[in-house]
């Protein structure tokens, strides 16, 4: 599970007012919720894109801190996806992930990578909490 910060001065609930609807728009029907660090995250068991096996996403609330976006994209084995003739879906999957993360965090892929690199350099134990 990866956690993403918002841009400075921004909050997740301001960027995405309806997290459940946004996740369904990007990835498919939500089938259940799953607890993570005291917050309920949405689970898409059968994502629309065949590259994804399962997606977990939602807001993680921290006392006294800004909420973070927590996401776990479980992808199927590339060989299986290609064997089924769904190789074209890989580009769509990358676009869906990046578009969703950009909408939620206000940070593009380069900015998110740079932020994770800084977190690893600052504290290797907290690398997953970027």
Image: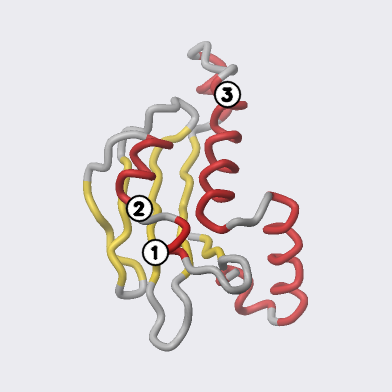
In percent of width and height, residue 61 lies at 38, 74
In the rendering, which numbered label is found on residue 19? 2
| Disc 3 versus disc 1: nearer the observer | 1
Residue at image location 49% in from the left, 33% down from the top:
76
- In the rendered structure, the answer to whether residue 46 lies left or right of residue 2 reads left
- Looking at the rendered structure, the secondary structure element under dot 3 is helix
Of all residues, the one furthest to the top in this rendering is 85
Residue at image location 53% in from the left, 61% down from the top:
2
Label 1 with label 2: CB-CB less than 8 Å:
yes
Seen in the picture, residue 44 relative to 48 is either above or below; the reply is: below
- Front-most of 91 and 53? 91
In percent of width and height, residue 17 lies at 36, 56
Q: Earlier in the sequence, mark 1 or mark 2?
A: 2
* Residue receiving disc 3: 79
Label 3 with label 2: CB-CB less than 8 Å:
no
- Looking at the rendered structure, the secondary structure element under dot 2 is helix
Seen in the picture, residue 114 relative to 37 is either above or below; the reply is: above
* Residue receiving disc 1: 59
Q: Residues within 10 Å of mark 3 (few under 14, many from 20)?
A: few
Seen in the picture, residue 25 relative to 116 is either above or below; the reply is: above
Marks 3 and 2 sit apart, C-alpha to C-alpha, by 32 Å
Q: Earlier in the sequence, mark 3 or mark 2?
A: 2
Q: Residues within 10 Å of mark 1 (few under 14, many from 20)?
A: many
Of all residues, the one furthest to the left in this rendering is 32
- In the rendered structure, the answer to whether residue 11 lies left or right of residue 21 reads right
Marks 1 and 2 sit apart, C-alpha to C-alpha, by 8 Å
Marks 3 and 1 sit apart, C-alpha to C-alpha, by 32 Å
Residue at image location 27% in from the left, 59% down from the top:
34
Q: Earlier in the sequence, mark 3 or mark 1?
A: 1
Residue at image location 57% in from the left, 23% down from the top:
79
- Looking at the rendered structure, the secondary structure element under dot 1 is strand
In percent of width and height, residue 57 lies at 40, 53
């Amino acid at each position: 599970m990866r956690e993403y910060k918002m841009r400075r001065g921004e909050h997740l609930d301001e960027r995405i007012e309806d997290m459940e609807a946004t996740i369904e728009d990007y990835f498919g029907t939500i089938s259940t919720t799953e607890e993570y660090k005291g917050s309920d995250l949405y689970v898409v068991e059968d994502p629309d894109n065949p590259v994804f096996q399962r997606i977990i996403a939602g807001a993680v609330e921290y006392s006294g801190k800004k909420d973070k976006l927590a996401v776990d994209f479980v992808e199927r084995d590339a060989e299986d996806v290609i064997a089924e003739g769904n190789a074209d879906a890989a580009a769509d999957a990358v676009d869906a992930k990046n578009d969703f993360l950009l909408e939620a965090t206000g940070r593009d892929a380069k900015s998110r990578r740079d932020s994770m690199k800084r977190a690893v350099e600052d504290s290797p134990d907290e690398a997953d909490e970027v």
